[in-house]
Amino acid sequence: MATSQALDLAAEAGLQLVEVNPKANPPVCKIMDYGKFKYESAKRDREAKKNQKTFELKEVKFRPKTHGHDFDFKLRHIRRFLEDGDKVKLVVQFRGREVTHPETGRAILDRVCQGAADLSLVIQAAQMEGNRMNMVLAPKRDASKAPKSAPRAVPRPPPGKEGSAPAPNSEEPLDEYVEDIPDEDEDDDLEDDDDGDGVEASSEAAPVD
């Protein structure tokens, strides 16, 4: 159809002739209400931007002496970040003469990779930057879509014992209560972190006369 004929048809209908594909040969045009088209396009863009999830780069810091309860606590956070689809930057901070033993930091990062192997991929291997050792983990494609564990249903009491409390389940997961259990090594970690010169406090008791 000739361009002049298409313009006449658009004018008769009270609409506009809009070029929708200029790269085609010949170009593709459409008779439409251009103002309504622009409004609906802007509305679709706003909805897509509203529903789009932004991913962040989370950072979790360790020390060469991080172990026990503190390590497990941070590993749980790393797994949660990966399940949410975020990337995680692992940082091992060295102090004083600790930087002369980078293998201790690499051992920490290897333990983290083993603990999150089912959820993560290493996109940046461990490397030293000053007194810090960095590594970046990214979630696997299906990790963010994996269903999270559903809450365990409370078992019903047997007939005739509705008023009695249900028996405790020996298979109840204990991960939720780990944080409430005091860790014996936690005080040692605090003493090690405060000791910037690498001098450790003596744990030997003085002899009693």
Image (spheres, grey):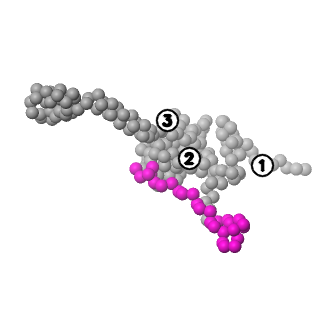
**Residue 86 visible within the image:** yes
Sequence-wise, which precedes: disc 1 or disc 2? 2
Residue 34: image quadrant is top left
The amino acid at mark 2 is His
Quadrant position of the N terminus in the picture: top left
Mark 1 to mark 2 CA distance (whole Å): 36 Å
Residue 182 screen position, x and y as percent? 71, 51
The amino acid at mark 3 is Glu
10 Å crowding of disc 2: few (<14), some (14-19), many (20+): some
10 Å crowding of disc 3: few (<14), some (14-19), many (20+): few
| Horizontal side of residue 15 vs 196, given as left or right | left
Residue 62 screen position, x and y as percent? 57, 42
Give the residues drawn in magenta, as a range. 141-170
* Disc 2 target residue: 77
> Residue 129 got which mark?
3
Assign a secondary structure to mark 3: strand
| Horizontal side of residue 144 vs 43, given as left or right | right
96 in relation to 68, above or below: above
> Residue 101 got which mark?
none
* Disc 1 target residue: 204
Q: Nearer the viewer, residue 88 or 34?
A: 34
Residue 198 screen position, x and y as percent? 66, 39
Mark 2 to mark 3 CA distance (whole Å): 24 Å
Assign a secondary structure to mark 2: helix
Q: Residue at x 42, y 44 (%)?
A: 123
Q: Residue at x 62, y 66 (%)?
A: 155
The reply to whether the magenta stretch includes residue 133 is no
The amino acid at mark 1 is Glu
Q: Residue at x 61, y 46 (%)?
A: 66
Q: Nearer the viewer, residue 122 or 30?
A: 30
